[in-house]
Image: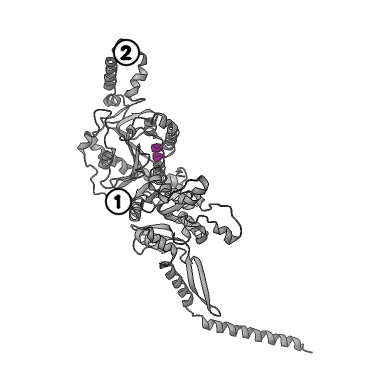
């Protein structure tokens, strides 16, 4: 006999399936076929994020401090209409259910770090900007994964990274402990990606446009180039209240603890700017010299400045009296393309001058010594500044033009206490471990270990000298006293020390005629100073036309591995 129970089970199954299908059709009838409900939610959240809450306490404080809101900063920095946000919906949403399977957002607190892609003077860049109005940029208002993602994206796309820091950039807050119910080990998991970018020559450019605290400070200081807005910027490991509890220093404010007169004069931040607008101008300028990554050559532009332009004033700029000073910036701006000179670190390490410029439209790094500070003797800070610039030029494939006038390393008790030789040797190591082409113009002095390291780091050397050049192991001032101590002592006893010293000095100065050195091929060529631009432009043109392709191939093959960090 047939089994009636099996027939009943089959009927029940069919009825259940039919009922489920009917319910799905009913639900589907409430959902638009074009997903307009989801798109509406997206539009609502984006509209909230793009509209400042002017009643929020953080926004009011931002404006009272004279700072731009985060999205105003994007408009001020990037080419108009070029910003494409990444993670535009990240944040905390309050939802209201409006149907069986429908809901709408009624409140939205966006992530306090806005990230995305945009253009600077037509070039694509990645950008991250803190929103200090939301939890002061702390991690309890941020998305950790979002920050790491953009650092990875810069590596994957080989695009420059711009960081506008105002707060802690996702750094820690004690409220995280309360939220999670446990405390955490403070790993900085994104930092390995930052170091990879730095060493691969992916430009990292940072601006301090508010208080940069903790992790925020570390992110901007790590950049290849950094600038601080003088009116609103500051930077510190911990704020005044934390400092007060740890070191008992009271009465500190942001400016006295870590303002531009602190960090733009000690090398923590490269440059100072009057305000946010000037910060963004400097970021655009620096990027214009740099490639998207170390796999590319720096961007060459057409120059309206003739490469064979002469400047006869250079014949007279070096005083015949050796102890007199001159303006070294006059030489730099005369030789490089007009209007192209951009100085990096002008307020610190002032015995040295460094920056970027162009020769016939070709980007180059520029190094000079500053005879107006400490006679041009290279001190610890000056060595640190030049070390940093050399590494920057090496990872960015920038050839380096050097104007040499160095009497040696700084001497005296201050020089010894500040570890001048330690940092001078580090500079020497950098000269000999970098591989970017160097061209030397010896405008006056080249003495001692400092002169030797700066001149001899490439084999063969590429250099010319001016008629004002003088060189040796020691400057005559002091050198004669050391070499002829006994003879001068005897002359002093007979009352003839001054006359004998003058005789020795005249003899040495005659023998130190740079033409005598050229006779012995101790210097390759002495040129008329007025022709310096023509000579340097020819060198830069050759580097870019011939040597650059070879360098890029060597980097691609891994045979050249520049290191910035």
Of residues 374 and 426, the one drawn nearer to the viewer in this rendering: 374
Of residues 345 and 57, the one drawn nearer to the viewer in this rendering: 57
Q: Quadrant of residue 464?
A: top left
Q: Residue at x 72, y 88 (%)?
A: 8
Q: Position of residue 425 (x, y in %)?
A: 44, 33
Residue at the left extreme, as displayed: 312
Q: Position of residue 137 (x, y in %)?
A: 47, 58
Q: Position of residue 329 (x, y in %)?
A: 28, 40
Of residues 123 and 192, the one drawn nearer to the viewer in this rendering: 192
**Is 218 colored magenta in this rendering?**
no
- Residue corresponding to mark 1: 301
- Residue corresponding to mark 2: 492
Of residues 277 and 203, the one drawn nearer to the viewer in this rendering: 277
Left/right placement of residue 371 relative to residue 131 reads left
Asked whether the beta carbons under mark 1 and mark 2 sit within 8 Å of each other, the answer is no
Left/right placement of residue 112 relative to residue 124 reads right
Residue at the top extreme, as displayed: 494
Q: Is residue 224 visible?
A: no
Callout 2: SS: helix
Q: Residue at x 44, y 45 (%)?
A: 555
Q: Is residue 466 visible?
A: yes
Start-end of magenta stretch? 381-386
Which of marks 2 and 1 precedes in the sequence? 1
């Amino acid at each position: 006999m047939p089994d009636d129970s099996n027939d009943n089970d089959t009927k029940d199954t069919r009825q259940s399936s039919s009922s489920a299908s009917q319910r799905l059709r009913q639900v589907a009838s409430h959902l638009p076929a074009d997903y307009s409900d989801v798109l509406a939610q997206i539009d609502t959240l984006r509209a909230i994020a793009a509209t400042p809450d002017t009643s929020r306490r953080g926004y009011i404080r931002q404006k009272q401090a004279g700072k731009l809101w985060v999205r105003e900063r994007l408009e001020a920095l990037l080419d108009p209409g070029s910003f494409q946000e990444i993670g535009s919906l990240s944040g905390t949403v309050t939802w209201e259910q409006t149907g069986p399977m429908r809901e709408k957002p009624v409140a939205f607190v966006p992530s306090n770090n806005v990230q995305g892609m945009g253009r600077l003077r037509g070039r694509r860049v990645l950008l991250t900007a803190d929103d200090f109005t939301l939890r002061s940029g702390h991690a309890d208002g941020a998305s950790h994964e979002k920050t790491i993602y953009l650092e990875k994206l810069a590596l994957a796309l080989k695009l420059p990274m711009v960081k506008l820091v105002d707060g802690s950039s996702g750094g820690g807050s004690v409220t995280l402990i309360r939220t999670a119910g446990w405390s955490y080990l403070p790993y900085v998991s994104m930092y390995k990606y930052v170091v990879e970018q730095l060493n691969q020559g992916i430009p990292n450019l940072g601006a301090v446009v508010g208080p940069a605290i903790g992790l925020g400070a570390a992110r901007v200081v790590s950049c290849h180039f950094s600038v601080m807005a003088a009116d609103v910027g500051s930077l510190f490991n911990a704020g005044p209240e934390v400092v007060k509890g740890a070191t008992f220093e009271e009465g500190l404010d942001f400016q006295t603890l870590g303002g531009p007169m602190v960090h733009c004069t000690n090398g923590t931040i490269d440059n100072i700017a009057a305000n946010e607008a000037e910060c963004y101008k400097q970021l655009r300028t620096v990027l214009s010299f740099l490639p998207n990554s170390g796999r590319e050559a720096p961007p060459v532009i057409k120059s309206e400045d003739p490469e064979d332009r002469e400047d006869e004033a250079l014949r007279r700029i070096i005083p015949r009296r050796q102890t007199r000073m001159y303006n070294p910036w006059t030489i730099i701006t005369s030789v490089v393309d007009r209007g192209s000179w951009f100085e990096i670190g002008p307020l610190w390490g002032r015995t040295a001058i460094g920056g970027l410029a162009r020769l016939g439209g070709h980007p180059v790094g520029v190094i000079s010594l500053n005879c107006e500070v400490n006679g041009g003797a290279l001190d610890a800070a000056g060595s640190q500044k030049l070390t940093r610039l050399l590494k920057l030029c090496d990872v960015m494939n920038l050839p380096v033009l050097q104007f040499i006038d160095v009497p040696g390393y700084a001497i005296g008790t201050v020089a010894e206490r500040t570890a001048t030789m330690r940092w001078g040797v580090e500079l020497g190591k950098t000269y000999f471990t970098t591989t970017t082409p160097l061209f030397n113009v010896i405008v006056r002095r080249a003495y001692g270990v400092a002169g030797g390291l700066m001149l001899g780091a490439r084999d063969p050397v590429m250099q010319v000298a001016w008629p004002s050049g003088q060189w040796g192991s020691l400057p005559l001032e002091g050198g004669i006293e050391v070499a002829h101590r006994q003879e001068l002592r005897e002359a002093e006893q007979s009352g003839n020390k001054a006359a004998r010293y003058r005789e020795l000095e005249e003899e040495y100065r005659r023998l130190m005629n740079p033409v005598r050195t050229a006779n012995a091929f101790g210097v390759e060529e002495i040129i008329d100073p007025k022709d310096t631009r023509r000579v340097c432009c020819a060198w830069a043109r050759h580097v870019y036309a011939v040597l650059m392709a070879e360098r890029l191939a060597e980097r691609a093959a891994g045979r050249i591995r520049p290191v910035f960090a």
